[in-house]
Image (cartoon, coloured by chain):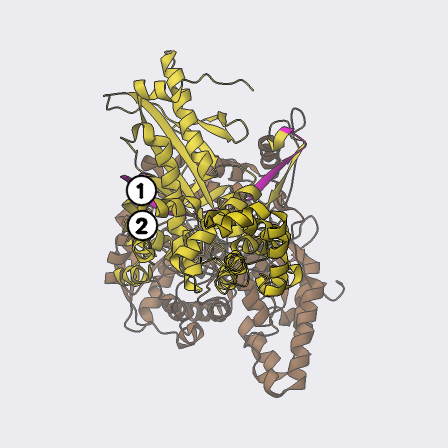
Chain colours: A yellow, B brown
Amino acid sequence: MSTDATLSFEEAMEKYDPVLGFEVHVELNTRTKMFSSAPNVFGDEPNTNVNEVDLGMPGVLPVVNRTAVESSIKIGLALNCKIAESCTFARKQYFYPDTPKNFQTSQYEDPIAYDGYLDIELADGTLFRVEIERAHMEEDAGKLTHMGGAAGRIQGADFSLVDYNRSGVPLVEIVTKPIEGAGSRAPELAKAYVAAVREIVKNLGVSDARMERGNVRCDANVSLRPHGRERFGIRSETKNVNSLRAVEHAVRYEIQRHAAVLDSGEPVIQETRHWHEDTRTTTSGRAKSDADDYRYFPEPDLVPIVASREWVEELRATLPEPPAARRKRLQADWGYSDLEFRDVVNAGVMDEIEETIAAGASASVARKWWMGEIVGRAKNADVDPGQLGVRPATIVELNKLVEAGKINNKMASEVLDGVLAGEGTPAEIVEKRGLAVVSDDGPLLEAIDAALAAQPDVAEKIRGGKLQAIGAIVGGVMKATRGQADAARVRELILEKLGVEG
Amino acid sequence: MTDTNELIRLSAARLAEKLRAGEVTSVQVTQAFLDRIAAVDGGERGVNAFLHVNTEEALAVAAEVDAIRAAGGAAAEELHELAGVPIAVKDLIVTIGQPTTAGSKILEGWHSPYDATVVKRLRAAKMPILGKTNLDEFAMGSSTEHSAYGPTRNPWDLDRIPGGSGGGSAAAVAAFEAPLALGTDTGGSIRQPGAVTGTVGVKPTYGSVSRYGAIAMASSLDQIGPVSRTVLDSALLHQVIGGHDPFDSTSLPDPLADLAAAARLGSVDGMKIGIIKELHGEGYQAGVENRFNESLDLLKEAGAEIVEVSCPNFKYALGAYYLIMPSEASSNLAKFDGVRYGLRVLPEEGPLTIERVMGATRAAGFGDEVKRRIILGTYALSAGYYDAYYGSAQKVRTLIQRDFEAAFAQADVLISPTAPTTAFKLGEKLNDPLAMYLNDVATIPANMAGVPGLSLPGGLADEDGLPVGIQLLAPARQDARLYQVGAVLESLLENKWGGPLLAQAPELAGSTETQEAK
């Protein structure tokens, strides 16, 4: 595989102005498929969630899933789009074995939602408006697995397997207008835009929005033009960039690659590109031109979808609070500083903190646990913090144990490990691991005597009023009790013993 | 017991009466038709109406009906009016338990895992399915010569075509191999075979019978409908298969009218019947024209007012049809690629890529007429040609709809010959597609506008003694009018002939030997 030349990002930015465009496919989490009654379920045995419609059997006809239409309207409304009063489906025709009818039923000329926008908040709080061209309904294709070739690619494969479980899963494709003016923040904007779309569809409850399962998939278009020129350059379309990080990296890489091509005096080739996560580069896919002939024509088996204004308003009334407004409200409610709140958002634990507070924790306790204990563990385990398995009730229970003086913070952290290891509830783990704070003064006094005896010079200093020296004795006691003593109580007892006023 | 030779000549309505009265059993009736099929359908000079005979299942359903009837009580009371009356199904309509080929090699041996909605309704009515009938491959043709399984012969003259694409269903009914059959009509495939075989065929209003399970040729034109020997029989069958189906998005929500009542009412008194100026005269065989005029006279005598209407845009119908139909067909037939079901052919040489396997499969599996229409449709939908071809054709469609609206403002029902000629000879037009296409000139406008049409026997042409069809057309959703007027004309004509037209059909070679047939 040859490597393409690239310019440094800084140099590319000096010479050129990037224009972006995104096509984000969102898989809806409807109970059944877009045009059939087969279940829409991820991860089942191949070719089990199919019926005659999904397999394109002779004689079958599609029937539009009403819930999918409602979900699409909700997405359109959340993207500030207009909703078409009447819209149709068309057939996009091409022969490929993952498409059972050899055409995809998709909206073409008249999408259900159009002319919207989304205000994207960048990391430093800057707002950037991305214009939405359209959001249209279509069906997903089946999944091909190429066997015998290198790296699962079709080239060189001995044969291919098709799983039609995904065939007919409802999709909404969200297409932006060309995004100009992002400049050197283009990669960051790319990531933030896809993150915002993902957040919206998740918040609406219309998609599971899990990028690792392909619920949200992004095709990123990039072109460059010299500063000051109005006409767009030739674009490349990097397909299936399926993580937020990858979106940022792919846009950055394509900017650098385009810049090198333009610098060499060659034209950029209009083509699709494949993203490679391992090398963080793209390679050439198939040449694509606007003249690709899909022989679109209106789907004669379906009647137009009529979205009455009453229905649209009914759906609008069910929309949850938009994510940006929600963030503003939560920050105010919780009393976090801008920095604290941004860290929480960037760590992806805002929902978790909200749930933890709802379960009875204070805002500061919830933040302390999620940011202080859980985010780090999630990073080590390479999963999202929310996927680690910590339930809000666990945090509330842990915090109660600390506040009651039953365990200290260090023990609480150990108990959390126990919870994650599946050893039981915090109370059970405290019991099993014998982690209770030692509050019976008897054993403590013994340990204090031993510590004082071991360090007579320190004891003397304390008696002489040098109270800061007490840390050495407390440390000795804590060590002897393997951290199970309540340090404050130890200090009290030492002072008592030595007859010094604290 | 009634003589089987007499039994198979009874109408479905009459058979149903005899079954209800206990004069005959469904097993006897069903066996009589199976015997007839065995006697006249096979062999070198056989009718070849059937691609598959469903003996075992048909007799089992018949026996079930007989058992219910014998037991009496509520279950017997609840039996459908046509329970136990057998039927043949065009092999474009999918059935569990029998092969469905669409008359094509590409589906040879394929068994559908599901039943078409109309088949479900036949089963619910407990009508024994005798088998699957021959057709032009994927219903593309007007002669049934384009079947991959050999042509069907016209029972009136075995050297002539039975019409198409539903020649199998029409010939089966005309040859007394079945009292009823299902057909599909995209541009005349029920009505034109009805005309040339002396039978009745109805294309219902688009959307009034579910298309779910009918292998699509042109989705916006296709419609399933009844084939029978009498107008009342078609009405009875139409009521079995019609009505809303949630599996077909183009299915109308309307409740079905009482079509059999309309047929039994049979009145034209005070009705205005419109002759379509553009659908007779020049280009129509003299014998066809004579029989047509005779029918007009009879209707006038019965109290109808005959008016002339003009549909100036009908002259564009055939041209527009031959853009819309192939365009949709090219898309509908894309699924036959050898990947999931049916024939799979590997290329004889070169690499085994999916494109090449698909190509080899389609090259070997489709016949010439199918390929011709796929190529035509693919071209018409191509970028740069879409507006000129598909787009313009859709505009013509609107104009045809307006012509119908204007015509129905002046007349309750329209009338024309069903086809410009009687049955032509096998092979006569096989190499002249345009001449073949012209046979549908009078039937296509109804499909383009979605309105219902009925063809009934109008007598025999003077010059060749072959059946002529009379077509009635009604506004969309007014199918009942077709049966009401059709029944009158049928009765007037039969009075004139002294019995059904089919009584004049020549005896088929095997027709007297039914007793020996297995």
The type of residue carrying mark 1 is Glu
- Name the residue at the bottom extreme: B73
Q: Can you tell which mark lies on residue B260?
A: none
Q: In the structure shown, which secondary structural element does the residue marked by tag 2 occupy? A: helix
The x and y percentages for residue A49 are 58, 54
Q: Whole-percent x and y of residue A31?
A: 49, 59
Question: In the rendered image, which residue does mark 1 sit on?
Answer: A121
Report the disc number at residue A324: 2
Would residue B476 be visible to someone looking at this image? yes
Tell me where the magenta segment starts and ends, as one range.
A124-150
Please, what secondary structure does the residue beneath circle 1 have? Answer: strand
Q: Residue B514 location, x and y as percent?
A: 71, 64
Q: Residue at coordinates 52% horizontally, 40% vertically from top-left?
A: B370
Q: Quadrant of residue B268?
A: bottom left
- Does residue B144 appear left or right of residue A18 in this picture? right
Of marks 1 and 2, which one's residue comes earlier in the chain? 1
Q: CA distance from mark 1 to mark 2?
A: 8 Å
- The residue carrying pointer 2 sits among few (fewer than 14), some (14 to 19) or many (20 or more) residues within 10 Å by Cα, namely some
Whole-percent x, y for residue A479 in the image: 61, 50
Q: CB of mark 1 within 8 Å of CB of mark 2? A: yes
Left or right of A110, for residue A394: right
Front-most of A389 and A417? A417
Of residues B277 and B219, the one nearer the viewer is B219
Provide the major secondary structure of the magenta segment: strand
Q: Is residue B255 left or right of residue B304?
A: right
Q: Residues within 10 Å of mark 1 (few under 14, many from 20)?
A: some
Q: Amino acid at mark 2?
A: Ala
Quadrant for the N terminus of chain A in the image: top right
* A256 relative to B249, above or below: above
Q: Is residue A129 magenta?
A: yes
